[in-house]
Structures are given as structure tokens and as C-alpha cells.
Image (cartoon, rainbow, N blue to C red):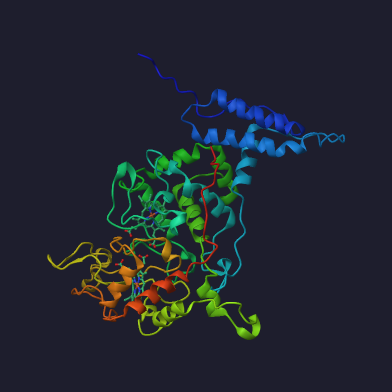
């Protein structure tokens, strides 16, 4: 029987490298990584790969130091930090976006750019799960507006939860930070700690995650940058992730520009911002269909809980999920769920807390019939008897809420 040897995870050869030899140094780092790396060490492979690529980028600069300047020296660690820095730089907070009352910096609890940058790594890092297979982004995917395209979530070992992963876009601006479908968490920080320990989500323990992150000199460097010293604890991990989440903001949609448009100031338009159909949907949303009684304000949520009859089983006369009731034990809260914001809503089908409605049209039909009758149905739910034309108009209006500024993709390099 053959014994499988696993080589150490960290690149061990450290040497001082003159800056004017950047290209050679970068290439030799790549080679060095190859000879001492375990096959399983994927992040080191990524660094080595990037080092090669950066080496090519850096090529024209080689020889520029020949004017007598004494070259500084860098180590592999410096080099790695430089590459990480370049791949995931600190980003300034955006100014006020069209459709918002204030900028991110003016919110109650504004994100700190250094912490948000650190949080961006942690958010996409699968090392936060027990078997290294799941990150926050597995279920809250950027391309789905930080939700996911399945009715319910699948966590570690393929285990399914009972609820759909909600989007946290524009959370920084909400009246109350989103606190799960049933409001059981206090803020985004508390929420970030939950899934790490949830046995069917990431299935790890806080101690194990803290140990893994603290074992990485790269991470410790960026913890120091974000918090003033390099101590890693679960509160800091959660704080950094929450700050990253707070930077995910959607604005400047066609609806926003329509709302802020001023003919005198902005001049005539080449084409209307909303189509006739979208404008009909807009008028229904804020008028007869009364959507804005719950989907209120710039971010389309009252941050409150309502029972629309989603998950009500008319045969057994039971709710599949008691929702807010589990937190408050108030009869009226049975089957009540948080009003989701509607920005980028087109990207996150299927809909509702249980993902039970495949399309936006299905959602509108649900409102048209006044929801599913059940003992705790919200008094705000009325039979609307919408025509097909009105339903299509409301669906079209949802499309006008697609904005910009929220998109992201995972960093390509992670601290080791
Ligand atoms: C296995 C899938 C999965 C993973 C992994 C996961 N989540 Fe979630 N997340 C969910 C589901 C499902 C909910 C809704 C749960 C509920 O309401 O009871 C949720 C809710 C949330 C919410 C609340 C949003 C709102 O509108 O109420 C936030 C914020 C959040 N998760 C952040 C995170 C962060 C940060 C991580 C990584 C540390 C993470 N999630 C990892 C599935 C996941
Ligand atoms: C009584 C308050 C209330 C009213 C009125 C209301 N909504 Fe909702 N809306 C909610 C709640 C609460 C949910 C989530 C319900 C659940 O999952 O059980 C929701 C979910 C949605 C969703 C799905 C979003 C997602 O991420 O899954 C859309 C789309 C939507 N509403 C649009 C509308 C439109 C359009 C109208 C008007 C026709 C409207 N709503 C009227 C409270 C309301």
C-alpha cells in the first residue's frame, strides 16, 4: 500500500529580493510555491499563478532602477500582501445615489472601508465552513442580488433548510437592519455569526473558525489594518462581514431617475425613463394596488412582519412555518414574515420566504386574489381583482427597480 505524503501548506522559502529584480523574483516565487506546496493548497496555487501573471505585467519596469538608486528589498510575505492589496483594494464609500435620501456614510451605522475590504475576503472564504465547501456567497450569490435561485438553501453535506436565503441589499438604509424572515437577530453582526455555527448551513464552530483565520499571517495583517491590532475573534469576523454587506447598495434605477427627474433642471429626455406599461405598474403600486403600504420608502420595506397566507395549507388548516410567532409567541404573528425590499427583485426568483412562487407573475396573482385566507391574514391584504394587463404592468414595474452599484464578484486571491 502506498502512503500519501502531504507537504506543508505554507510556502517555506523566504528570501530577500531586490526590487529591480521583480520579474525574476515573482517567477521564482511561483516556482518556489510549486516545489513546496501540497496539492490541496489551492489558495497558494492561486497566489503562485497570480505571481506569474503579475510578473508578466511588471516586466516593462525591470531595469528602471538603473539610475543609481539603492533598491529596497522585499520578502515573499511583502509580495503576497502587495498582490492581495492589489486584488482586493480598500474601496471608498460611494456618494449619494439617485433614489436615496443619503449617502452610505450618512447612515446610522456606516461601514468602515478597511473593515469592509477585510469582510469581502471573509464573506467569500469557504474556510468559514467545517469542510471548506461553503461560504456566505454559496447561498447569498452576487449574481442573484445576494439571494439564490433555489426555493430553499442547501448547506453543508447537501442539507436543505426550510427557507429561502433573503437578499441583504440596501440593508444599511433600512429602518431596521434585516433580521431574518422572522426578525430573530438583532443586527447584521449577530446574523453573520449564525450560519457559521448552524449545523445545516456552514456547520463549524466559532472557535474553530477563529483558529483557522488567526493561523493566517495574511489575515492577521488585514485584521490589524481594520481594527488596530491583529487579534482575531468572532465579533471582529462578524463586524467585518457585516460592513461588507452594508456596502452592497443598489440605486440609480430607472424608477429612481423617473422619481427625481425634473424637466426644468434636467432638460428634455430622448426617451421616457419608464415605458407606458411600467408607468401603469408604478401608478398601481403606489395607488390602487396599495403595495406601498408595506413596501414603503426608498428601499421598499417597512421592516415589519405580515401574514400573506404564504405556506398556508387549506387541507390541513395549518401553516407550514409559524414565522414571527416563534419569536414573539403572539397569536397575530403566526405566519407573518418580514417585508422584503424590492430592489433587484427580478434577479432572485423564486419568491417568498419558502420560495414557493416561481415567478413575479405568480406573486402578483397571489396579491390579486387577496392572499390565502387564514386566521392571521394581514388586514392590509385586500382582494385586488387585477386584470391581466394590470398584473403584467406590476411585473414590468419590478424590472424598473434594477439599479447599479451592488454587483460584486469574489476576490481571486485570499490571505493565507
Ligand atoms: C446554507 C445557506 C446559507 C449560508 C451558507 C449563509 N446563509 Fe445567510 N441566510 C440563509 C437563509 C436560508 C436565510 C433566511 C433564514 C431565516 O430567515 O430564518 C439567511 C438569512 C441571512 C440574512 C438576513 C437577510 C434578511 O433580509 O433578513 C443575512 C444578512 C445573512 N443570511 C447573511 C449571511 C452571512 C454573512 C453568511 C456567511 C457568514 C451567510 N448568511 C451564510 C442561508 C444561508
Ligand atoms: C401587507 C403588506 C404587504 C403588501 C400590501 C404587499 N406586500 Fe409584497 N410582500 C410582503 C411580505 C410580508 C412579503 C414576504 C411574504 C412571505 O414570504 O411570506 C412580500 C413579498 C413580496 C414579493 C417577493 C419578494 C421576494 O424577495 O421574495 C414581491 C415581488 C412583492 N411582495 C411585491 C408586492 C407588490 C407588487 C404588491 C402590491 C400588489 C405587494 N407586494 C403588496 C408584504 C406586503
Instruction: Name which residue lies at 48% across and 54% down.
Output: 239
The answer to whether residue 12 of the structure is visible from this angle is: yes
Instruction: Name which residue lies at 55% across and 36% down.
Output: 46
Pinpoint residue 272: horizontal percent, then vertical percent: 55, 78
Pinpoint residue 366: horizontal percent, then vertical percent: 28, 72
| Residue that extends furthest to the right in the rendered view of this protein | 67
Check the image and report above or below for 301 versus 320: below
Quadrant housing residue 134: top left
Quadrant housing residue 15: top right
Check the image and report above or below for 114 versus 307: above
Instruction: Name which residue lies at 64% across and 37% down.
Output: 53
In the picture provided, is 83 more to the left or to the right than 155? Answer: right
Point out the image quarter for the N terminus: top left
The answer to whether residue 338 of the structure is visible from this angle is: no
Quadrant housing residue 56: top right
- Number of numbered discs: 0
Check the image and report above or below for 85 versus 290: above
In the picture provided, is 22 more to the left or to the right than 280? Answer: right
| Residue that extends furthest to the top in the rendered view of this protein | 1
Query: Closest to the observer: 265 or 293?
Result: 265
Pinpoint residue 135: horizontal percent, then vertical percent: 42, 46
Pinpoint residue 145: horizontal percent, then vertical percent: 45, 59
Q: Quadrant of ligand 2?
A: bottom left
In the picture provided, is 400 more to the left or to the right than 28? Answer: left
Query: Closest to the observer: 199 or 379?
Result: 379
Amino acid at each position: 500500500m502506498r502512503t500519501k505524503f502531504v507537504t506543508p501548506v505554507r510556502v517555506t522559502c523566504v528570501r530577500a529580493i531586490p526590487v529591480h529584480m521583480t520579474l525574476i523574483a515573482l517567477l521564482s516565487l511561483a516556482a518556489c510555491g510549486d516545489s513546496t506546496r501540497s496539492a490541496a493548497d489551492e489558495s497558494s496555487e492561486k497566489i503562485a499563478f497570480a505571481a506569474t501573471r503579475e510578473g508578466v505585467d511588471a516586466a516593462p519596469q525591470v531595469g528602471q532602477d538603473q539610475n543609481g538608486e539603492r533598491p529596497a528589498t522585499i520578502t515573499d510575505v511583502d509580495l503576497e500582501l502587495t498582490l492581495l492589496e492589489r486584488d482586493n483594494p480598500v474601496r471608498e464609500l460611494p456618494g449619494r445615489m439617485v433614489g436615496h435620501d443619503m449617502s452610505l456614510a450618512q447612515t446610522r451605522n456606516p461601514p468602515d472601508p478597511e473593515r469592509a475590504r477585510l469582510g469581502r475576503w471573509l464573506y467569500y472564504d469557504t474556510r468559514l465552513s467545517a469542510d471548506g465547501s461553503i461560504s456566505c456567497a454559496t447561498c447569498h450569490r452576487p449574481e442573484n442580488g445576494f439571494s439564490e435561485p433555489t426555493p430553499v438553501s442547501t448547506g453543508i453535506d447537501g442539507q436543505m433548510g426550510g427557507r429561502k436565503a433573503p437578499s441583504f441589499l440596501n440593508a444599511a438604509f433600512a429602518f431596521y437592519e434585516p433580521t431574518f424572515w422572522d426578525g430573530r437577530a438583532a443586527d447584521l453582526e449577530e446574523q453573520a455569526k449564525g450560519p457559521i455555527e448552524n449545523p445545516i448551513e456552514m456547520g463549524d464552530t466559532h472557535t474553530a473558525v477563529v483558529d483557522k483565520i488567526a493561523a493566517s499571517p495574511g489575515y492577521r495583517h488585514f485584521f490589524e489594518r481594520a481594527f488596530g491590532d491583529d487579534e482575531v475573534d468572532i465579533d471582529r469576523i462578524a463586524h467585518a462581514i457585516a460592513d461588507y454587506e452594508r456596502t452592497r447598495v443598489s440605486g440609480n434605477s430607472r424608477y429612481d431617475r423617473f422619481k427625481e427627474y425634473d424637466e426644468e433642471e434636467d432638460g428634455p429626455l430622448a426617451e421616457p425613463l419608464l415605458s407606458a406599461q411600467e408607468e401603469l405598474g408604478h401608478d398601481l403600486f403606489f395607488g390602487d394596488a396599495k403595495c406601498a403600504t408595506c413596501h414603503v420608502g426608498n428601499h421598499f420595506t417597512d421592516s415589519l412582519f405580515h401574514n400573506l397566507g404564504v405556506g398556508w395549507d387549506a387541507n390541513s388548516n395549518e401553516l407550514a412555518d409559524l414565522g414571527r410567532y416563534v419569536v414573539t409567541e403572539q397569536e397575530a404573528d403566526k405566519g407573518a414574515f418580514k417585508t422584503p425590499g424590492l430592489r433587484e427583485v427580478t434577479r432572485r426568483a423564486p419568491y417568498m420566504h419558502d420560495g414557493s412562487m416561481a415567478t413575479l407573475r405568480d406573486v402578483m396573482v397571489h396579491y390579486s386574489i387577496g392572499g390565502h385566507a387564514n386566521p392571521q391574514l394581514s388586514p392590509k391584504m385586500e382582494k385586488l381583482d387585477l386584470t391581466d394587463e394590470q398584473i403584467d404592468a406590476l411585473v414590468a414595474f419590478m424590472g424598473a427597480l434594477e439599479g447599479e452599484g451592488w454587483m460584486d464578484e469574489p476576490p481571486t486571491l485570499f490571505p493565507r
